[in-house]
Image: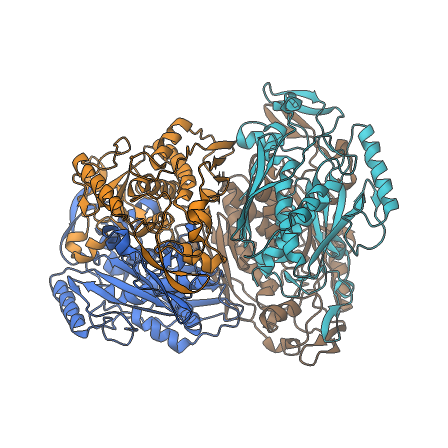
Chain colours: A cyan, B brown, C blue, D orange
Amino acid sequence: MSTSYNGNIKFTVFGQSHAPEIGVTIEGLPLGFEPDFDELNTFLQRRAPGRSGIGTTRNEADIPEFSELTDGKITAIIRNTDIRPEDYSELKFKPRPGHADYTAYVKYGSIPSGGGQFSGRMTAPLCIVGGLCLQILKAQGITVISRIAELGGICDEGELYSSTADNAFPVVDSVCGEKMRSAILSAKACGDSLGGVIECKILGVPAGVGNKMFGGMESRISSLVFAVPAVKGIEFGAGFEAARMRGSENNDAFYAENGKIYTKTNNCGGILGGITDGMPIVFRAAIKPTPSIALEQDTVDLRTGENCKLRVSGRHDACIVPRAVPCIEAAAAIAVLDALMEK
Amino acid sequence: MSTSYNGNIKFTVFGQSHAPEIGVTIEGLPLGFEPDFDELNTFLQRRAPGRSGIGTTRNEADIPEFSELTDGKITAIIRNTDIRPEDYSELKFKPRPGHADYTAYVKYGSIPSGGGQFSGRMTAPLCIVGGLCLQILKAQGITVISRIAELGGICDEGELYSSTADNAFPVVDSVCGEKMRSAILSAKACGDSLGGVIECKILGVPAGVGNKMFGGMESRISSLVFAVPAVKGIEFGAGFEAARMRGSENNDAFYAENGKIYTKTNNCGGILGGITDGMPIVFRAAIKPTPSIALEQDTVDLRTGENCKLRVSGRHDACIVPRAVPCIEAAAAIAVLDALMEK
Amino acid sequence: MSTSYNGNIKFTVFGQSHAPEIGVTIEGLPLGFEPDFDELNTFLQRRAPGRSGIGTTRNEADIPEFSELTDGKITAIIRNTDIRPEDYSELKFKPRPGHADYTAYVKYGSIPSGGGQFSGRMTAPLCIVGGLCLQILKAQGITVISRIAELGGICDEGELYSSTADNAFPVVDSVCGEKMRSAILSAKACGDSLGGVIECKILGVPAGVGNKMFGGMESRISSLVFAVPAVKGIEFGAGFEAARMRGSENNDAFYAENGKIYTKTNNCGGILGGITDGMPIVFRAAIKPTPSIALEQDTVDLRTGENCKLRVSGRHDACIVPRAVPCIEAAAAIAVLDALMEK
Amino acid sequence: MSTSYNGNIKFTVFGQSHAPEIGVTIEGLPLGFEPDFDELNTFLQRRAPGRSGIGTTRNEADIPEFSELTDGKITAIIRNTDIRPEDYSELKFKPRPGHADYTAYVKYGSIPSGGGQFSGRMTAPLCIVGGLCLQILKAQGITVISRIAELGGICDEGELYSSTADNAFPVVDSVCGEKMRSAILSAKACGDSLGGVIECKILGVPAGVGNKMFGGMESRISSLVFAVPAVKGIEFGAGFEAARMRGSENNDAFYAENGKIYTKTNNCGGILGGITDGMPIVFRAAIKPTPSIALEQDTVDLRTGENCKLRVSGRHDACIVPRAVPCIEAAAAIAVLDALMEK
């Protein structure tokens, strides 16, 4: 548990934000799978800092070195090169509101520098695993696409049909994307931050994947998606809206066409009884605003127990939602491949 | 996986809706724990049919027999007494929209009678485990409380401070409860059904429970809550609303009082970095409307592949939300006790 | 852990020797597998008391009832009918040497009646699982055969080529078997007991099953075989003899014949680097003599802490080795099928 | 499974014999544990090549670098510096008898260079984990000691009471040790190799550790000990000898002294019903002779399917038993600490 995922695919994340390296060792990938490292690096660049021109100025190449490539087992190591622990000296005893500083302190006895294993930087190893899973899924005709559905009160318009990976900003409608980008810059200018909602669709999954009870696709996907820091909610298909519908509205009627069975709507998000029905898996994840903000906040000095003020310096994204998009895809890809391997 | 939960607490659910019995065998409970069976039966009665006067007419005593009580291991068996498989004859080949019939058929080759292990009836064993966990938690000063927060467009008013277990309808404001009950009866009269949102709070959990990444409390709770059939969304603290806030609004400021540390707000739902911060754990779960409705629906006859119509008879709840309340408490209690046992 | 096995096949044993029932719930069997219950009962009868005419007089039909038969999941319950807890009254505070009474007392606070879950009776559920696995293996051309290789100083002569299941006494050479049977009766007449060595071969396993390190066939088989009470040693192929050979003697030379690769000898017991090489898997398990004997023994009264004497009455086998033979086959079958499911 | 151990302590081994590095990431060590790295390196040197003056000439410093030291999580990396893959060119298609070459080829499609993850070199990460566990156990008053009990037909004399770690050759009686060393040199001179038997005792384990059935100490220890390459047998206490005793001989009588309970003999090896009884845990492991020998052997050329001859060059130990001693201690330490953490 904690830094290990132990399904049909197994992996363990190691290292920390301010340690010499972070990495991951993966086991249980299909024998014979040969990774396309260029494609993987392209995927990882979507998560890497600096891409959208509005994120952290921490500069990490984030190019993993791979030291095993046989037997369905891969180990990848990313050297941390641009560490500035001095940014964090005041933070050693003053927990940042909204961050894991205080809970890490209670659990482990100290606040880890740079967030330690709680840092968003730890999603890089997750994206390595997810990026490899995406390649395996693609070979089976399965694709994972996503977009920012909502950010700073602005909703992306249009339906999500294809990947937004090549867009400068991961939305369907670039006009909405521009508005979101402005909202981020405006929040940043105030020393503040924004959150958002990411929508993710998994296309091409056959019916019959997943299982009842604790093996259901919602359980599998949600437990991985909540491992991405800052996710505070998830809903499948119509989700919370389904709770407001009548059964006659929410039920997805079946129909047959050319010998195949479909549903007319997809309020269930492609999952019935925990098992896929052959329609796209659809979910949305709520991402809270970055907790590290420049504005003054109230906190407690853990040395003295006194109330005090805090201004967080350091190089933080005013909105991590754009960089979280590939992380959510990675989490989804792992969950789906893991379930597929059970068939 | 699937019918087994394999944490620090381990349990396996067995049996089916229309089999002679359903049951559960549990391992890993604290040595020396002596269950209070009266209290457990009181808890189980909250899930049992017929309590609110508006549910299914299937009449099951649902009194488990316990055959092991030592070594932290317990096996409980509930005899199924009021089975009417004949209600399901037409359903053998016509999958009910919104139900697991079709996906079970794809996965297992046939539609299980009465929903088989997909039936809501399988939450009875879950409630046995959860009811025992609740007793163990209570001895540690931890209580799990919940209520219907929203049903048929009606929101429960007031704050959730204490258990609604003794209320005829599990809400804080009984006037709202009456409206919800009317809404259910009205949907039922139309042959239709309703869903709703359940809010759950876990009080008294110390700071420092849970872990980072895959061991986070959101991952643990969500994977168990989604094992309750009909749950389609979950959010912690401010949840999807947090995605619409700025960091300065969403961050929960820390303050010290009498040597203890608290947060002024609880938008994080008591969880930061996957670890509890000592404030109440708060989450909401979206429950879809019961898929089995009397209204005519479109489906496919799996023998012929032809489109056809279906009316579901059988004894179904027009709204399972009231009976789902203890199930959500059970899932939450299991997740919290399991995490506590790791300390 | 403990009463659950959690591999690709998962099962949990429940009940106790002197409880109303014992049983097992199994998950993860291949979909579509249809058990042959007559064949299973024939297998279970090999373990059941009374068969060889020399075992315990406890009379249990040991016919399981099966309550689930779908989805690769099966639950089996055996009612305990011939319980005599009164045989155990003196044993409540005087631990029997060689038995788990004392260690159970330290761990759980009391000596369980009739051995509780430490009783050899708990191998009945193990044999149910193993008996089902044997049927699945047989359909893939894999058979598990075994025999008593040594008992009371008498070695079985001849090579083990085929099943001894139909023999009154599970040996290759019936003359040796008669001598073993006499040795048991003679030990019994003295109020004493005997142990022995069981040899097991698994034929037809293809090369390439199992894995390196913690996934090796020796690790998998041994961890299941040691779950059979009274097993105190296991060796694969030449085993302890291999430790006395030179490399040039112990190495099994490869040769090709008709396009297939074989080894000239099988000192490695069909396993190299934890993975099968296509030759028979061969192992031997050492079974200690039954600890419950009629002869007076030294023990301690746990109430007073005083040294005292003990004579064990009750209905115990003077030698459980014949009844352990199918248990060892069951353990081996589970391990091999579990590893095969990983391919 | 395979390269991950997933108990209360969790660890994953990565890298290969001829890769740039090998390593291990460990999770679940007790919070607050501070490793003594000097002591760990001293332990690792017992496994490292060259110590006894009779092993491989491969020269690896084997000093791990540690990159995480918080939260009960540690990652260690050993750079491989003295690789000579050219020694293995002929071996790419001619599997060495007694080695995992052929089975790896069947499973993974090629013979891994230098044994890959099947190499004895992979026991270095196991010893890192075990060495840390030994430190944690020592702080609880538990020590693991062992010796070569038998090698090349020569038995070590005397009882094993204390650690042999400081002895040039890990035996109790140095005269016997000298004879063993001569036997190894003599086998080496013939281009041959030797195996042996290692005896291991774990002192100071309290009664009540371990569990029944699949959680028994024999299952836990054996599954880890068989992960050490070349182990082909294990026996606890009297082991295979117990199979030749009568119950009255084998049973270990209990007696009380100064308010504590002991057994007069220890034929059960400190384990009854899978649970420790407070006496030393005692087991012996059979190590087969090194399969890589200089003498000509028969094998098959996998390219042509033709029978052929093979002489293994490369730098191999003529007897790995001395270097296996700390590996067995490491495996035992992990199993015992893992079981202790369950209490």
Q: In the image shown, does B294 or A315 lie closer to the viewer?
A: A315
Query: In the rendering, at what x and y percent does residue C243 appear?
Result: 25, 51
Q: Is residue C20 visible?
A: no
As drawn, which residue projects farthest toward the right?
A175
Q: Nearer the viewer, residue C58 or B61?
A: C58
Q: Nearer the viewer, residue D23 or B254?
A: D23
Q: Quadrant of residue C185?
A: bottom left
Total marks shown come to: 0
User: Residue at 44% of width from left, 28% of height from top?
Assistant: D34
The answer to which image quadrant residue B91 occupies is bottom right
Q: Is residue B182 above or below residue A320?
A: below
The relative height of residue B340 versus residue C280 in the rendered view (above or below) is above
Vertical placement of residue C103 versus B293, above or below:
above
The residue depicted at 66 percent of the width and 78 percent of the height is B90
* Residue B145 in view (yes/no): yes
Give the image location of residue B271, x and y in percent: 63, 38
Residue D291 place in picture, x, y as percent: 33, 51
B329 lies left or right of A163: left
Q: Say above or below: B39 vs A276.
A: above
Q: Quadrant of the C terminus of chain A?
A: bottom right
Tell me which corner region of the image, top left, top right, bottom left or bottom right, holds residue D328: top left
Q: Residue at x 14, y 66 (%)?
A: C183
Residue C138's spot in the image, x, y percent? 41, 73
